[in-house]
Image (cartoon, helix red, strand yellow):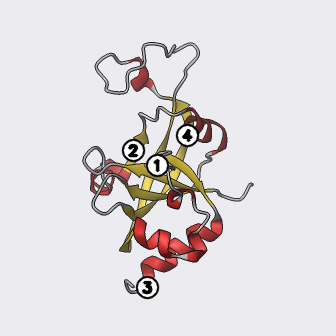
Amino acid sequence: MPEPRYWLFKSEPSSYSWDDLTAEDGQTAEWDGVRNYQARNFMRDDMRIGDYVLFYHSNAKPPGVIGTARIVREGYPDDSAWNPDSRYYDAKSDPANPTWMMVDIKAERRLPRFISLNELKANPALADMMVTKRGQRLSVQPVTAAEWAEVLAMAERAAP
């Protein structure tokens, strides 16, 4: 069995927050609406059941990591693309050859302490983490095992 991979999923709390995820029945949700080809490819080709997720509140004051989750269903067609009433509708997507994919995630735990983007950027061990890079806007992005471990360690330490 391959080693689990690590990911960071961004969500605007006004659209879908950590509290929304943990209020779901079984704390499991479809991660739909991703409309970026690179992020779609990660979901379609690389994510596996058991992979770890950092749940990140974006477009928040401040943005940052609030909790962890796991992938519980591997990539499958995102049917919101075919629903004209959905904000994620894509008239070019064809059910016979789906353009967009989604995965299911299950909440694991809220971190003991919220880790802001500024804290992530200030940590030299996270200098190469995608979310800390200027202009990095992918809503789904890979995280290394070392970055994952450092973020969790930061959450256990007192705020700087």
Q: Position of residue 79 (x, y in %)?
A: 44, 24
- Whichever of labels 1 and 3 marks the residue nearer the N terminus, that label is 1
Q: Amino acid at mark 2?
A: Ala
Task: Check if mark 2's residue and mark 1's residue have beta carbons within 8 Å.
Answer: yes
Camera-side mark, 4 or 2: 4
Q: Secondary structure at mark 4?
A: helix
* CA distance for labels 3 and 4: 31 Å
Q: Amino acid at mark 4?
A: Ala
- Whichever of labels 4 and 2 marks the residue nearer the N terminus, that label is 2
Picture residue at 52% right of the left edge, 27% below the top? 100
Q: Which residue is mark 3?
A: 157
Q: Does 86 appear above or below 137?
A: above
Task: Check if mark 4's residue and mark 2's residue have beta carbons within 8 Å.
Answer: no
Q: Secondary structure at mark 1?
A: strand
* Badge number at residue 29: 2
Count residues near mark 3 (Cα–Cα under 10 Å), then give few for <14, some for 14-19, many for 20+: few
Q: Amino acid at mark 3?
A: Arg
Q: Position of residue 56 (x, y in %)?
A: 41, 57
* CA distance for labels 3 and 2: 29 Å
Q: Secondary structure at mark 3?
A: loop
Which quadrant holds the C terminus? bottom left
- Whichever of labels 3 and 4 marks the residue nearer the N terminus, that label is 4
Camera-side mark, 3 or 2: 3
Q: Position of residue 2 (x, y in %)?
A: 74, 55
Q: In this view, which residue lies farthest toward the right?
A: 1
Q: Which residue is mark 4?
A: 39
Q: Which residue is mark 1?
A: 105
Camera-side mark, 4 or 1: 4
* CA distance for labels 4 and 2: 17 Å
